[in-house]
Image (cartoon, rainbow, N blue to C red):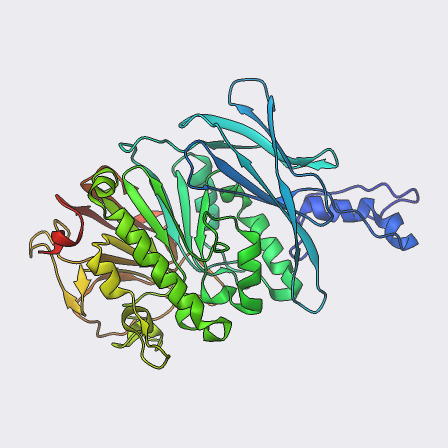
Amino acid sequence: MRDVNKNGSEFCVAFRLKMVPVHAACALLSLSPLLVLGVPPVWTQPEQVHLSYPGVIGSMVVTWTTFNKTESKVEYGLKGGPLFQMSASGDATLFVDSGREKRKMYIHRVTLSGLKPGSTYIYHCGSEQGWSDVFLFTALNDSTSFSPRFALYGDLGNENPQSLARLQKETQLGMYDAILHIGDFAYDMHEDNARVGDEFMRQIEAVAAYVPYMTCPGNHEAPYNFSNYRNRFSMPGQTESLWYSWNLGSVHIISLSTEVYFYLEFGLDLLFRQYKWLEEDLEVANRPENRAVRPWIVTMGHRPMYCSDDDQDDCTKFDSFVRLGRKDTKPPAPGLEDLFHRYGVDLELWAHEHTYERLWPVYGDKVCNGSKEQPYVNPKAPVHIITGSAGCREKTDRFNPNPKDWSAFRSTDYGYTRMQVVNSTHLHLEQVSDDQQGKVIDSIWVVKDKHGPFAWV
């Protein structure tokens, strides 16, 4: 870095200062005369840009951050056409982090509507006081015969984000239609008065500004009653991103909070509210007219109900809170296994354990394969995938050397999972090892001729 000259102009070089990106460091230099004079700087440059799908066909939500209040505007246009010929406006919400400094930031949200499904759009966001970089996205296809492709992972940190570079490149190559981040962000978003959260959101911009970045809360989001998580993301529904559902192609995806079973100080009512919502959502999804159109039901929640890690986490216990509920509350809190089995959930995605583990179809702690030769063809119970090894400062976990019968494949490599819902009967999953330069180390097809609770018979 070079010194600022006498009239305050700066000369910036490509570098980073301890979690401060180039553009922010350069902006700091350019404002140094104001800092010397004691005049507060004006931070109006958009950053931390990310997309989410609001659940309405032809729509996309653009979210970003500034550190002073500005207008909230997105300018966009079809790829190949005139740039920025369309615009949409939204609102900015003040978020005050609960750390010692009570740092203030403005979270901007703009919903783009009337998009042509399958068409690619070029956009930037901000205001006349500052614009973001230019990004692009493809509006989600509204056909139920569409075969969406996802990247799945949890536990991605600001330090040691080993899989991130590969995910950035694959996203920008157009390999995914959406990302499912299954809890635990930044490690931790609230740290250093939420500056770690800022840096993490800048890091994932190279993924999240190009495809919908869909999330659920993990245990690392708990400080200040999940305030950084609830304020930074823009998921569908009215529960501040804690739980919601959405449709894409032939799949109905449910995002939920497993943390309601562990942070009762934030209100036992949250647990019962979510459970009631899950029952209602699953009942609607299982109506014959809906299941015929979207036969696949996939859930994503942070803490698994089964695992074979050697760490004494909830999933290592037969009486797992997530699986069987809590008997120490009044009234007793119901678990999720019976609920998901009763409504014929096909696939359950989890993280939290810093490993990859694929289970045989399992219910009631027992293997329920479709057959010995083809366990995932017409399985007799939901399939579970644990994918929490994207990379973080806590490194990877260790496995119990004597797993139960339901453990089919496991790996401690850093990596992430790909999923494609090919059609109404076929779903493909594969695990990518970043340790092995992107090698696919596990792959299965889940094949179902029928869906719903009667599929278990």
Indicate the position of residue 93 as horizontal and vertical percent values: 64, 50
Q: Is residue 441 above or below residue 261?
A: above
In this view, which residue lies farthest toward the bottom? 328
| Residue 49 makes an appearance in the image | yes
Quarter in which the C terminus is drawn: bottom left
Q: Residue at x 33, y 38 (%)?
A: 148
Q: Is residue 9 above or below residue 342?
A: above
Task: Name the image quarter holding residue 330.
Answer: bottom left
- Number of numbered callouts drawn: 0
Out of 101 and 442, give the one closest to the viewer: 101
The answer to whether 422 appears left or right of 155 in the picture is left
The answer to whether 268 appears left or right of 14 in the picture is left
In this view, which residue lies farthest toward the top? 81
Task: Name the image quarter holding residue 395.
Answer: bottom left
Out of 334 and 455, give the one closest to the viewer: 334
Indicate the position of residue 34 as horizontal and vertical percent values: 88, 49
Q: Is residue 201 above or below residue 102?
A: above
Indicate the position of residue 246 as horizontal and vertical percent values: 37, 45
The answer to whether 10 appears left or right of 78 in the picture is right
Q: Residue at x 90, y 54 (%)?
A: 36
| Residue 419 makes an appearance in the image | no
The answer to whether 338 appears left or right of 216 in the picture is left
Q: Is residue 344 above or below residue 130?
A: below
Out of 81 and 411, give the one closest to the viewer: 81
Out of 224 and 192, give the one closest to the viewer: 224
Indicate the position of residue 186 as horizontal and vertical percent values: 53, 59
Q: Residue at x 57, y 27 (%)?
A: 76
